[in-house]
Amino acid sequence: MELWRGSIGELIKSGRRALGFWGAPPRAALEAAAAAHPGAPWLDLDVFRGAPRSRAVPDAFCHIIRNCVENAVAAALALECVVAATGPEKCDSGRFAARLVAELTGLRVVETVNTGLADPAPALLCDAAGPLQARVVRVMEAIVEPLTPAEIEAAAGARAAPTHGFWGTPPHPIGLLDLFPDTTAVFGWTRCVEQGRPADLELECAVPVGLPVVFFSQGFCAKGLLARRLAQEHRGMHVDAHDVLHAATRAKIEAFIRLAGEGL
């Protein structure tokens, strides 16, 4: 299966018809949609693509869910359907967004629930050393385009003892991840996705004792409840962000990372 990496405008201009998705739908649902529409690339609707505001989503709402709705509306004429994660592997808002997108666009929205693999897959990228943003983005891309044998070998070879941790979902703005050193391990929902168990709450809460971790939650996301509690338990830092990464939040993260690296 092919992942569309261009803009929505480029997709529309290309004349191609794509398949939209958000969250981590089960592989079988993705393959079924791909088989029904041979050659159609996949458009990840979770990603911020600069789509116009639809006015259907409140301002004080999770930016990732806003992306899902506004991307689907903007790309509707170029989409065959949307495969949406709507169970505990996403959130209740994923279910609400599925209904809203169907009403706003008339698209067929396939609601899915991902119960996960029986045995967790290796957390290769989450435990490898390397630029954090690139690793997190590739974890999400692998929902459609799995790691190649060469990437698997490279990730396994780059495994390193972590100095810091990032817990949470891929953030908006994604540039927040550039604040972290290459030796940052990934935990929370992102790690659950790489291990094929996006609804596994025990795995989502698993964090090594003693590792300095930034627990991130998207502004107005229910996971803030979990992030704050885990930060208290592990003496980590809980931060959230909404539309932008404010200077004060950036400074707090940078200070936490620096002081943790100095062992303070």
Image: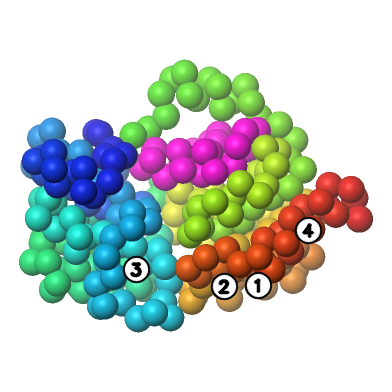
Q: Does residue 119 appear left or right of residue 19 in this picture? A: right
Residue at left offset 43%, top offset 81% = 60
**Which x, y percent locates residue 239?**
64, 67
Badge 4 amino acid: Phe
Label 4 crowd (10 A; few <14 / some 14-19 / many >=20): some
* Disc 1 element: helix
The Cα–Cα distance between marks 2 and 1, rounded to whole angstroms, is 6 Å
Circle nearer the N terminus (2, 4): 2
Q: Is residue 121 magenta?
A: yes
**Which x, y percent locates residue 140?**
42, 45
Circle nearer the N terminus (2, 3): 3
Label 1 crowd (10 A; few <14 / some 14-19 / many >=20): some
Circle nearer the N terminus (3, 4): 3
**Which x, y percent locates residue 106?**
8, 66
Q: Which mark is residue 256?
A: 4
Circle nearer the N terminus (1, 3): 3
Asked which quadrant contains residue 83, the reply is: bottom left
The Cα–Cα distance between marks 2 and 3, rounded to whole angstroms, is 17 Å
Q: Does residue 75 appear left or right of residue 166 in this picture? A: left
Read off the magenta span: 119-143
Residue 41 vs 230, above or below: the answer is: above
Q: Which residue is mark 2?
A: 224
* Disc 2 element: helix
- Which of 109 and 206 lies nearest the eye of the viewer? 109
